[in-house]
Image (cartoon, grey):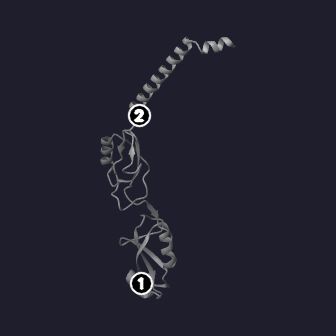
């Protein structure tokens, strides 16, 4: 046991300990410098604002900024943005990121997705309006024809043409309801019109 303590106090042990400390410090300094250089420590790129940019313009701007990108699925159509333009990005514009960082984009689709016209024939105008609103369609106008069912929907029109339940229209389309006015149609007149 005494020999061990004598060795710890010996000159050769202290020299070896000093050399080990110097080598350790040099290795730490070299490792930190290498990490600084390889990770561009302290070098940041400010994320540009890509809002409303076309995908083609975004690609060029991404390349110029030294960043990478990934386009996520398109969102619901937003009429405030051009078609096929950037509507969201992550990270947001103005954030500082390292060079070669990936930016994620959400692109505005070409238009509203299509929805199915519900079966609103022989339904009251009020209920029909609610059913249409539920699927994303709007009632632009209501016109009346001579039919016994007052405020009962008899026909549906879109851009002046008759459509039927099950047809597909872009979401937010404005349609016209053709409803009865509560008057019994004059069958003789209808027969004369069809002749």
Which numbered dot is residue 113? Answer: none
Tell me: residue 22, above or below residue 125: above
Q: What residue sits 31% from the left and 45% below the top?
A: 61
Res 86 seen here: yes
- Circle 1 — which element? helix
> What is the x, y in percent for residue 117?
47, 67
Q: Residues within 10 Å of mark 2 (few under 14, many from 20)?
A: few
* Displayed quadrant of residue 97: top left
Task: Work out whether residue 186 or residue 69 is closer to the camera in this orientation and state it.
Answer: 69
Taking the image as shown, residue 109 lies to the left or right of residue 18, namely: left
From mark 1 to mark 2, how far is it between C-alphas? 83 Å
Q: What residue sits 56% from the left and 14% below the top?
A: 13
Q: What residue sits 38% from the left and 38% below the top?
A: 42
* Displayed quadrant of residue 167: bottom left
In the picture of the structure, the residue carrying the numbered disc 1 is: 190
- Circle 2 — which element? loop
> What is the x, y in percent for residue 153?
48, 78
Which numbered dot is residue 39? Answer: 2
Task: Work out whether residue 193 or residue 68 is closer to the camera in this orientation and state it.
Answer: 68
Tell me: residue 94, above or below residue 101: below
For the C terminus, give its image quadrant: bottom left
| Front label number (1 vs 2) | 2
Task: Work out whether residue 13 or residue 173 is closer to the camera in this orientation and state it.
Answer: 13
């Amino acid at each position: 046991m005494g020999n061990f303590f004598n060795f710890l106090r010996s000159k050769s042990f202290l020299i070896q300990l000093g050399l080990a400390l110097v080598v350790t410090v040099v290795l730490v300094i070299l490792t930190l410098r290498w990490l600084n250089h390889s990770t561009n420590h302290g070098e940041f790129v400010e994320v540009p604002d890509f809002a409303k940019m076309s995908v083609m313009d975004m690609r060029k701007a991404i390349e110029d900024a030294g960043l990478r990108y990934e386009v996520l699925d398109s969102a619901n159509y937003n009429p405030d943005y051009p078609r096929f333009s950037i509507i969201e990005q992550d990270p947001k514009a103005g954030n500082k990121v390292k060079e070669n960082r990936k930016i994620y984009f959400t692109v505005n689709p070409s238009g509203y997705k299509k929805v199915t016209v519900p079966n609103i024939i022989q339904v009251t105008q009020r209920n029909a309006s609610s059913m249409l609103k539920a699927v994303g369609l709007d009632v632009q106008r209501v016109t009346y024809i001579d039919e016994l069912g007052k405020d009962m929907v008899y026909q549906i029109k879109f851009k002046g043409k008759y459509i039927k339940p099950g047809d597909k229209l872009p979401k937010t389309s404005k349609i016209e309801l053709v409803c009865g006015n509560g008057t019994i149609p004059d069958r003789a007149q209808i027969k004369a019109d069809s002749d």
